[in-house]
Image (cartoon, rainbow, N blue to C red):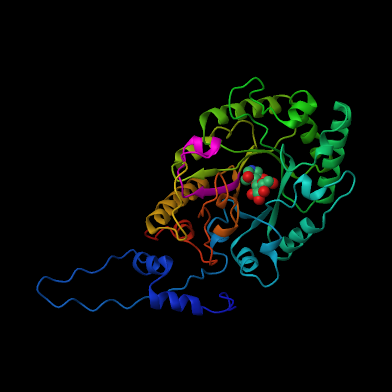
Amino acid sequence: MVNKNQLQLTYRDRLKLLTGAAGLAALTACGGGGSSSPTPPSGGTPPPAPPTPPVSTTPVDGLLRDTFRNNFVVGAAIGSAQIAEGSEDADILSKQFSSITAENLMKPDALAPTEGTYTFEAADALIAFAEANNLQVRGHTLLWYRATPDYFFEGTREEIKARLQKYITDVVTHFKGRVYAWDVVNEAISDGDGPTAPYRDSNWYQAAGGPDYIDWAFEAARAADPDVKLFINDYNTELAGKRARLVTVVEDLIARGIPLDGVGHQAHIQQSTSAADVFAGLDAFTNMFAGLENHITELDISVYSDPASCFDNATGCQPSVGNTLPAARAREQATRYRELFSGFAARSNLTSVTLWGLTDDASWLNSFPVDRPNYPLIYDRDRDPKTAFLAITDPNYVI
Ligand code: 9MR
């Protein structure tokens, strides 16, 4: 395969220009310069079409990360496939991003599938790739109610606490100095106002007989590494109810002196979500205490706008848009991405923005909440930057 970063215009790019098949190339050609088609003078001969400006789907090296260099690092969640030597994904990561998160490789079921045996190799390879390419690493995640082997929950409360703290001590120590932030506790907040609210009624909550496990996790992480930033991470902070419950928990942690540096906002949103609601999620935590940081940790924008029933019981989900992203949807999505990144850049305590995946084909949203092709990221299945990429990196780009 031709490495498109070795050439200014690849075979595929030229083919797209010739066939006019590429939405991106076409959009760039007519929208990139902010011009519209000239109107022929009435009765006269239409002027000749302006020459097609040179178009390449390869942005200049560093465009994405440099656009936000003074604002936040720009990350992508990845796995072993994306760092394969010579792959287009690895090339994109090294050229356009400044941070990575392991989508799965640093979760408890990946690092310690059986008690007392650590399997760090795949995560270490990810970190070695990051270090070789000047990418920072966000750690995800030390404690979650999913992706955790059953043995974590066996025994008495004291045994469970000791096991959890040993696990966190070992893992944080192993990655010490190589990870800039950890999602220490992931998704511990309830989605509703049930009996355990604001806490999720989870395996961890049951095993600890309450929310104390959150304290155990943060204390062990801080003891193992005094410098790494410690985050509580959750989804739906763009929704008022979930946000209020997370605020309650964060206030309590701070008041009791639990070591916490920031709030991770997953930002798994859909097209119907307004940027204002995402910003409200961020702003609720700003100035809660000096130095509290916000991170956007798992950003993606589903091109579907599904009702709650789709997430609850897979009914009422929007039908598939098919195997190509319709241009109108691509533009709507690009608009939302632009609004978000411009608002992110305006918030000084937002220090990291991570997309939950690199290319659309790799997204978990192709099978959640139902099997259906989705297009939630800023690189398409051909590894070309999408309209959304242009919208966030070029303020003059006409969407
Ligand atoms: O995208 C991840 C998917 O590949 C895994 O199967 C799943 C279970 O480990 O986790 C997904 O990532 C989740 C993340 O860790 C926490 N927030 C929600 C993400 C999507 O489910």
What percent of the width, then of the height, locates residue 25? Answer: 41, 69
* Image point (60%, 78%), residue name: 1
367 displayed left or right of 333: right
Whether residue 176 appears in this view of the structure is: no
Span of residues in magenta: 296-316
361 displayed left or right of 13: right
What percent of the width, then of the height, locates residue 318? Answer: 45, 45
Whether residue 22 appears in this view of the structure is: yes
* Image point (55%, 66%), residue name: 383
Residue 156's place in the image compared with 370, above or below, is above
Q: Nearer the viewer, residue 194 or 32?
A: 194
Q: Nearer the viewer, residue 42 or 375?
A: 375
* Quadrant of image for the C terminus: bottom left
Q: Nearer the viewer, residue 59 or 57?
A: 57
Snapshot quadrant of residue 221: top right
Q: Residue 309 colored magenta?
A: yes
Q: Residue 159 colored magenta?
A: no
Residue 131's place in the image compared with 196, above or below, is below
